[in-house]
Amino acid sequence: IMGFVCISSSIIMRDLNAAGYSPIISMMTGSLIGLLLGLIPGFINGFFVAKLKVPPFIATLGMWGITNGLAWRLCEGFPIGFLPLQVRDIGNAYLAYFSPKKGFSF
């Protein structure tokens, strides 16, 4: 499910950025739509486990196959490129700084 969500939100971010929207808008929209897209397989999995009494491992394995196929179909086997430059800053930035004299600062 994570791969499907990552690929879907990356495609949305790339397309919105290419259409001229600001990087912040495209990143926020892609992230929110990615969260919503992640709920769909989760609810389907929960329905199969809770109502149809499918074993959780089997339901998860089946949903993995479905979302893996959807992700492969969306990106056609190629990496997603041309994302906003601010996307790479997400993993390289600091959220909170700790200074021994000041404590935490944001």
Image (cartoon, rainbow, N blue to C red):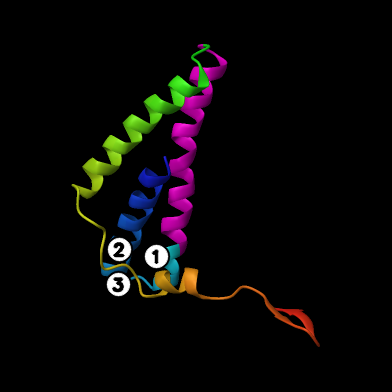
Query: Does label 1 or label 3 sit earlier along the sequence?
Result: 3
Could you say which quadrant of the image residue 99 lies in? bottom right
Give the residue displayed 48% in from the left and 74% down from the top: 92
Q: Which residue is mark 2?
A: 14
| Label at residue 8 | none
Give the residue displayed 24% in from the left and 42% down from the top: 72
Give the residue displayed 53% in from the left and 11% down from the top: 53
Mark 1 residue element: helix
Looking at the image, which is closer to me, 16 or 7?
7
Q: Disc 3 or disc 2, which is closer to the eye? A: 2
Amino acid at the residue labelled 2: Arg
Query: Does label 2 or label 1 sit earlier along the sequence?
Result: 2
**Magenta-highlighted residues:** 28-52
Q: Main secondary structure of the magenta part?
A: helix
Q: Which residue is mark 1?
A: 26
Instruction: Give x and y (percent) for residue 36.
Output: 47, 44
Looking at the image, which is closer to me, 55 or 33?
55
Amino acid at the residue labelled 3: Gly
Q: Which residue is mark 3?
A: 20
Would residue 103 be found to the left or right of residue 88 on screen? right
